[in-house]
């Protein structure tokens, strides 16, 4: 899978699971997903980790302070 395909799947997963368009601070989840995906690609996606797993891992921290 190419980097672009991987990022698209990562972003799609976040958007599908989020159930909303933006965070409480007003930042768009779409923007966040596109900004975050490349670092997950570099950290594991390029080695075969699934984008959905990585998106889920990132989202598991949402709401924690």
Image (tube, grey):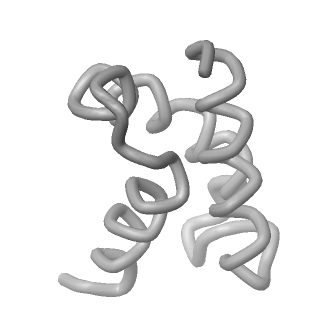
**Residue 40, above or below 21:** above
Q: In the image, what residue occupies the spot 45% across and 37% down?
A: 36
Q: On screen, 16 above or below 32? A: below
> Number of numbered discs present?
0
- Specify the quadrant of the image occupied by residue 54: bottom left
On the picture, is 60 further left or further right than 26? left
Q: Residue at x 67, y 17 (%)?
A: 4
Vertical placement of 36 versus 60: above or below?
above
Question: x, y percentage for residue 40?
Answer: 34, 35
- Image vertical order of residue 36 relative to residue 55, above or below: above
Give residue 13's position: percent from left, percent from top. Answer: 67, 61
Q: Is residue 2 left or right of residue 44?
A: right
Place residue 60 in its image quadrant. bottom left
The front one of 28 and 58 is 58
Would residue 65 be found to the left or right of residue 12 on screen? left
Q: In the picture, which quadrant includes the N terminus?
A: top right
| Quarter of the C terminus within the rendering | bottom left
Q: Position of residue 45 (x, y in %)?
A: 37, 32
Residue depicted at 44% across the width and 23% down the height: 38
Q: Position of residue 18 (x, y in %)?
A: 68, 77
Q: Quadrant of residue 33?
A: top right
Q: Nearer the viewer, residue 25 or 3?
A: 3
């Amino acid at each position: 899978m190419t980097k672009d395909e991987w990022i698209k799947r990562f972003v799609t997963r976040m958007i599908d699971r989020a159930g909303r368009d933006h965070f409480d601070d007003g930042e768009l989840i779409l923007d966040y997903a596109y900004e975050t995906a490349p670092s997950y690609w570099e950290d594991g996606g390029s080695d075969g980790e699934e984008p959905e797993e990585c998106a889920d891992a990132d989202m598991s921290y949402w709401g924690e302070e």
